Amino acid sequence: MGAKLLTISDAVAVVENGMTIGIGGWGSRRKPMALVRALARGPATDLTVVAYGGPDVGLLAAAGKIRKLVSGFVSLDSVPLEPHFRAARQRGEIEFAELDEGMLQWGLLAAAHRLPFLPIRAGLGSDVPATFPGLRTVTSPYDDGEELLAMPALPLDVAFVHANRADAAGNAAFLGPDPYFDDLFCLAARHRVLSCERVVETAELTKEAPVQALRINRMMVDAVVETPNGAHFTSCVPDYDRDEAFQRAYVTAAGGDGAGWAAFRDRYLAGDEAAYQAAVRADDGSARRAGDRAQAKEGAR
């Protein structure tokens, strides 16, 4: 039962150059950031990333890991556009396949069912077909004869998701208000890595949430990693909310002249996950106050 329990570094070591990886969560909410930080530190590059993007995409873009991104958006929620992603796109460093959010879901669902595509109305009448090379339509074989988009499957080599609680076998409970599409990311992938706030006994999983919150089961998971505060600085409700002050400091550093990001990276990202968490705990607030000042200055313009 405990054979799936791995360290962060061992869990991400499966990722190789050129792979397609999926990252669960949504924007700046319940992202598997401990795993993402390890990916950013690791050797794998030239990745295709599939995600409802947030700082996961930003950190990997800043580290030069992404060749292609498939997403419906890349946002920090309270900050509309992720700054590292924006900069990478402006420099032409990342190929971007932008989809309607429902199309991305349908692509994962098709991959989960091992289908080549699924028909969908979302995207019709938009510019998505013009910006997504090879996207085709199909005609309903029934009397209605409706023309629909044929959303191709989005199979993943590896998926990374984060949950509130999990057992050593890979059964997981989401305690927050929305499971997002983490189950689809797992079902669409050949190898699935689940990080969690806390590993508990199986019987404990239904003590904090109803059985319906167990959207991921052991058949959908290959590796389990216990990462307390592992979604930081994104939210992992109800364990903790998004660290808005830290996010402001991140955005300020990312949007500066390069020296600010270098200082941020050296303070928070140069070491392993334990070093990151220690830096967050020991933070005297100076970096966060700088982010607050920058936001106040921007708002006064």
Image (tube, helix red, strand yellow):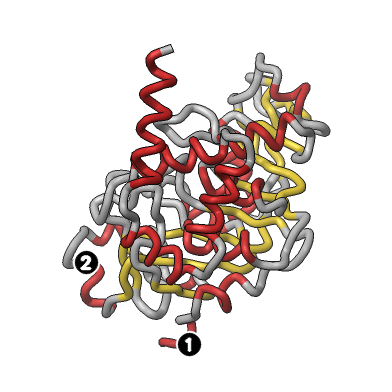
Q: Nearer the viewer, mark 1 or mark 2?
A: 1
Residue 200 vertical position relative to residue 180 in the rendered view, above or below: below
Q: Residue furthest right?
A: 134
Left or right of 96 in this view: 215:
left
The residue closer to the viewer here, 279 or 215, is 279
- Which residue is at a point 36% across and 43% down the rendered structure image? 288
Does residue 189 show up? yes
Residue at image point 71% right, 49% down: 66
Front-most of residues 151 and 286: 286
The image quadrant of residue 207 is bottom left
Quadrant including the N terminus = bottom left
- 104 versus 211 height, above or below: above
Residue beneath disc 2: 206
Name the kind of residue labelled 1 in the image.
Ala
Residue 210: % across, % down: 21, 58
Q: CA distance from mark 1 to mark 2?
A: 22 Å
Q: Earlier in the sequence, mark 1 or mark 2?
A: 1
For residue 186, say whether it is visible.
Answer: no
Q: Number of marks in the image?
A: 2
Residue closest to the far left? 207
Picture residue at 35% right of the left edge, 33% below the top: 292
Instruction: Say which residue label 1 marks.
Output: 3
Q: Quadrant of residue 270?
A: bottom right
Please state, as top left, top right, bottom left or bottom right, where the C terminus lies in the image.
top left
Which structural element holds mark 2? helix
- x and y percent of residue 138 in the render? 74, 29
- Estimate the x, y position of residue 33 in percent, counting from the top left: 48, 57
> Residue 151: image x %, image y %?
68, 36
Judging depth in this view, the residue of 242 and 199 nearest the camera is 242
